[in-house]
Amino acid sequence: MSNYIPLIATITNINQLTAHEKLFNISIEGLKQPNHQPGQFYMVSIFGFGEAPISICSSPDDKNIQLCVRKVGSLTSKLHSMNLGDTFGVRGPYGHGFPVNDFKGKDLLLVAGGLGLAPLRSFIRYIFQHRKDFKDFTLLYGSKKPEDRLFTEEINEWSSDKNVRFIETVDIAEPNWNGNIGLITMLFKFIEPDPKKTMALIIGPPVMYRFVIREMLKKNISIHQIYMDLERRMRCGLGKCGHCQLNGVYVCQQGPVFKYSDMIEWNLKEAL
């Protein structure tokens, strides 16, 4: 498969998650089974509307490839208008995903904000499919409002599953909301991770990172045990256009997942 020529993806199912996000099941020509790793992305293209990076939110062990798409521009608006059987182009998968092997045998602390739950879901599903490979599992999730919460059916399952400690919050509550209210950092008061055993992963809006990292450091989690996803700034996915370059580092090639200690060493800390 050429890195420059898109393959044809066909929409096989569509699920409206929120007012702004849809979940697309796709089949890709010539691809009999998923070939991505958790945390990787596709470059999605529609002729006449451009191209954009979209996270893969399904596990590589799932039967279907799934993309969660927020309606924010011309390309994603066009994608939202498509129906079952319609097609578009995909290139990839690209990027270094979540360090699955580094997380095996460890306690897990995963933190997702807003749309960040979409790419993280790929790893979450993988963890449940290989639960014996991982120790204690804590998942923190923050949304702006209750109606912005993604994958609500799965959230309900996680909330009642003894194999994961799931805690969530919303910034702004509604009269019928009975959960936590406040920024995602307030959830750290409910957890006491073992810093010697814990591997942490953060993904969400850029403004969230430095404050979540601060809370993790307060829990004595090492900078070598914190990973984050910088899935933004990308345009070509191949390290050719330079649009994602930060101090000589190409996010699309050397990321989008980075270890926090590497970010400090490469002077990428200020990008957060």
Image (cartoon, helix red, strand yellow):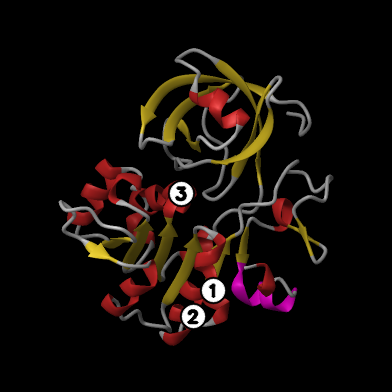
Quick check: marks 2 and 1 in contact, CB under 8 Å?
yes
Instruction: Assign a secondary structure to mark 1.
Output: helix
* Amino acid of disc 3: Leu
The alpha-carbon separation of the residues under discs 3 and 2 comes to 21 Å
Q: Residue at x 58, y 25 (%)?
A: 31
Q: Which residues are magenta?
A: 259-266
Residue 237's tag is: none
- Pick the residue in front: 229 or 115: 115
Residue 257 among magenta residues:
no
| Residue 79 falls left or right of residue 178 | right
- Pointer 3 residue: 115
Mark 2 highlights which residue? 214
Q: Is residue 166 above or below residue 3?
A: below
Please indicate whether residue 235 sits to the left or right of residue 177 in the image. right
Q: Label 2: few (<14), some or many (≥20) within 10 Å? A: few
Residue 96 position within the rendered picture, expressed as x and y whole percent measured from the top left: 64, 54
In which quadrant will I find the C terminus? bottom right
Question: Horizontal and vertical percent for residue 91?
Answer: 68, 32
Relative height, residue 9 to residue 245 (above, below): above
Q: CA distance from mark 1 to mark 3?
A: 17 Å
Q: Which part of the image, by quadrant, shows the N terminus?
A: top right
**Disc 1 residue type (three-letter):** Arg
Tell me: 149 left or right of 7: left
Q: Residue at x 46, y 15 (%)?
A: 83
Residue 7 image position (x, y, % from top left) = 67, 23
Is residue 64 left or right of 266 when viewed as pictured? left
Residue 144 percent location from the top left of the image: 37, 55
Q: Residue at x 77, y 44 (%)?
A: 238
Front residue (pair 203, 21): 21
| Disc marking residue 210 | 1
